[in-house]
Amino acid sequence: MSTALRRVVLSGLMALALAIPLAAPPTAAASDATASAVATLDDQQDLRQECQQHAEADSAQGWIKSRFESCHRHHYDLVLARRGTNERIGTLAFDLWVLGFAYDGTRRVDYVASAENIIVSQEAADADPTQWGIDMRFSAAVVNSAGSIANPNQARTALLGSWDTTPQWTITYTSPSDTATDPYGIVNGNVQLTLGVYGEGGDITPWSDDTLRYSNIRFDSAGRVAGKNEGAVFTNARVVIPFSLSSPTFPQSARHYNDAINNPVLTFPSGPKNVPGVNAPLHRTLNATIQDANNRAARKTCDEVWGPYDGTLLNCDEYPFATTQEGAAKGDGNYSARLIDARDNQAAGSWLVSNYTLNRLLDGDAFYIAITP
């Protein structure tokens, strides 16, 4: 279709969209969400640019950049058929974008969704593309926890001209902390998107996307252990904490972790090991009893190998970390303990905790480490 023809068609769509009510207007919740979007235009533009480089954005789960950003995108080329006879009457092409933003500091997740770059063609003389529309629906459900999500069902159903004029809308989900029974106020949610195309006059066979696009989210009020008192995250994000071998503050710690994972023959206790962290995840523990047990088990190894070191400038460094479920007290021998410079050990510990809070990792949350040059 030529550019000129596209302009003529969409001009007609926009005019008609103003004159004819929508089949199902956006809910009040959706309209309120649009008015109170938090993510800045720069945030949205940056995420879109990155999203274009990731093929997984065109999948059911989408591309999850971090615990606080996610993205779905897909280009549709549809052939529309007449209801009843299945006769081809036209085509519709458009781009779907859904940018997700969770926030460290508030129990809130925003989705900025759009249907854009709309191109239509009329192939049957009696077909009326100005009566065709897109139906976009978001639904949120609580899973594996107690609590509630406000305004769980939000929709925008509009003629193509309305989408062309205003392609973007924002869906906001919040979760009141007082509805959760978990001590950290955790409410887990699953958000699903359903997308369809319809004809206002019933002249086309309705179409719906077979790909059920979704994201998994979590709201919490964990307090200081998570950094800020409240927050929300995309739980399927892969959290990776880097430790650099050339770090000016913790090079010995990074070398120790690298040896534990890649050169276990150089570590104690001796014996075959399969230490997690790179190929298998670690899991944070907030259980003080487990942390103390991990620390005691590691110190026992340091004492046995190097003898007493109290009063020196050395610390017993342990990997996996004492703050993980996979620490030395797990009893499977897949750990390493080593005497290193105390300041180095403490700097690595501070770096680890800062990344826990940066990623809002709570009890049982999985993460990986990366040994970098």
Image: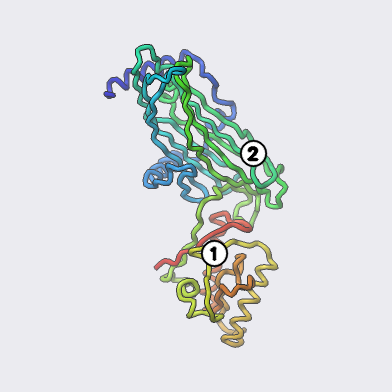
Circle 2 — which element? loop
Q: Which residue is mark 2?
A: 149
Q: Identify residue type, mark 1.
A: Leu
In this view, the residue in front, 156 or 143, is 143
The quadrant holding residue 161 is top left
Quarter of the image with the N terminus in it: top left
Q: Are marks 2 and 1 in contact (CB under 8 Å)?
A: no
Viewer-nearest of labels 2 and 1? 2
Residue 261 seen by the camera: yes
The C terminus - image quarter: bottom left
- Identified by mark 2, the residue type is Ile
Q: Position of residue 168 (x, y in %)?
A: 46, 31
Q: Position of residue 132 (x, y in %)?
A: 44, 20
The answer to whether 32 is drawn above or below residue 185 in the figure is above
**Which label's residue is closer to the chain start, 2 or 1?**
2
Residue visible at 49% across and 46% down in the picture: 69
Q: Quadrant of residue 166?
A: top left
User: Is disc 1 placed on a helix, strand or loop?
Assistant: helix
- Counting other residues with Cα less than 10 Å from the Cα at mark 1, is it few (<14), some (14-19), or many (20 or more)? some
The image position of residue 97, as x and y in percent, is: 44, 36
Is residue 17 visible to us here?
A: no
At x 51% / y 19%, what residue is drawn? 22
| Residue lying at 55% horizontally and 76% vertically, measured from the top left | 336
Residue 352 got which mark?
1
Image height check: is 294 above or below 95?
below
Residue visible at 56% across and 48% down in the picture:
233
Name the quadrant containing residue 248.
Answer: bottom left
The residue at the far front in this view is: 85
Q: Nearer the viewer, residue 55 or 22?
A: 55
